[in-house]
Amino acid sequence: MVQAHSMKQVRSEISLVEGKWEASVWLEGWALYPEDGAKIPPGTPGDPNTAGREWLKTLDEADHKVMRDTALMFLDYTYRLTLDGKRLEAEYSFPDYTVPLPELPENEDGNVLMRIDLKGEISQGTVGAFMLEWTDPEDEPMVLSIVKPEPRLLRIEPRTPAVELFMIAADGSSTETEGTSLFGWIIHGFEHILPKGLDHILFILGLFFLQPKAKPLLWQTTSFTLAHSITLALVVLGLFTVPSHIVEPMIALSIAYVGLENLWVKELKPWRIGLVFGLGLLHGMGFASVMKEMEIPEGAVLKPLIGFNLGVEIGQITVLASAFAATFMILKKPAFGIVRKAASLLIGTTGLYWTVERIWF
């Protein structure tokens, strides 16, 4: 394999319709030069904005051929589609190259992207799992959007076992996998809390350490759940949005607040329920940022929205249950007061650190 530079952005789409499959992969153009003959702008990859359209204008037809050849060898090695354990044959094409020197699109970082299309057919009577194995030697993950038959988004880590995308029946049709079912969406929502959502975990623990009793927690968690469900639905449906560079620091600040407030407030006050509702609106936007990336087509929103939200709720309940289990022996003892203050201080200072980090870094 020709060794390419480390990709910062790897995105793919796959569709399967009536025994025919199509896939598209987008790779950063500057990375498609062999290490021993790199024609890349100074500062890349430290300064990704150096590899945009202005850089593209400096390339000739031979340079574009290098990029295309490297892309083919790279994908042949790293992007393996299999059915029933056998690798699928693919026909490759470059849809942007209707002219020798095309105007390639840029991603949000300012880097030009090369699109490579793959397509193939499934032999009649072949049954089994349609799978993708991503083996990038630079250990970059891939964001995979399944467009048809059931929209969903996957993050595929490199050097891991192949991921099942569909099950192919004898008539060539596909069936739901665990990831596309309602249960699959519940799993995605749960995983966004445990183990991936440390910021949301700390917020829930901040509610717990205020007053670890059923009634105060019920009021707070109900308010929080109602609020984040509202904004999650509004953002996913495209009715409302706030940029992530605003939402993420505010989520961190909310964590800092609930943690530090616990140091001087020892029981639930009525105004805190309203405050938690407001903070829940923020967290709902954070949850929605994950689902927005899925680009779920109109008409296919309900199941992912319900499943993801249920998964988030189950994750939150699991966090609270774990907190009760971990502190059960000391809940009514003086030692809990020390644990409560220490934990709340840790939550608060972590939230402040994240706030600064998300604003300035």
Image (cartoon, rainbow, N blue to C red):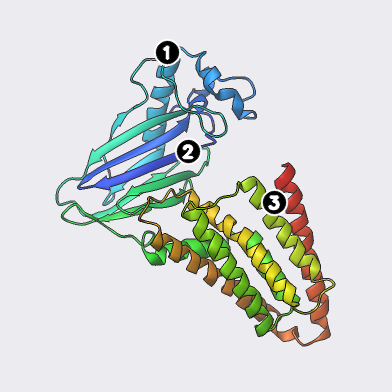
Query: Which residue in the rendered view is the most extreme toward the front?
Result: 239
- Residue at image point 14% right, 48% down: 124
Q: Which mark is residue 249?
A: 3
Sort mark 2 into few (<14), some (14-19) or many (20+) by Cα contacts within 10 Å.
Answer: some
Query: Which residue in the rendered view is the most extreme toward the bottom?
Result: 332
Q: Are marks 3 and 1 in contact (CB under 8 Å)?
A: no
Q: Position of residue 115 (x, y in %)?
A: 40, 30
Q: Nearer the viewer, residue 32 or 259?
A: 259
First of labels 2, 3 by sequence position: 2
* Viewport quadrant of the C terminus: top right
Q: Are marks 1 and 2 in contact (CB under 8 Å)?
A: no
Q: Which mark is residue 10?
A: 2
Q: Nearer the viewer, residue 279 or 17?
A: 279
Which label sits in the foreground, 2 or 3?
Answer: 3
Q: Position of residue 337 (x, y in %)?
A: 82, 79
User: What residue is shown with label 1?
Assistant: 62
Q: Is residue 92 above or below residue 11?
A: above
First of labels 1, 2 by sequence position: 2
Sort mark 1 into few (<14), some (14-19) or many (20+) by Cα contacts within 10 Å.
Answer: few
Q: Secondary structure at mark 2?
A: strand
Residue 38 seen in the figure: no
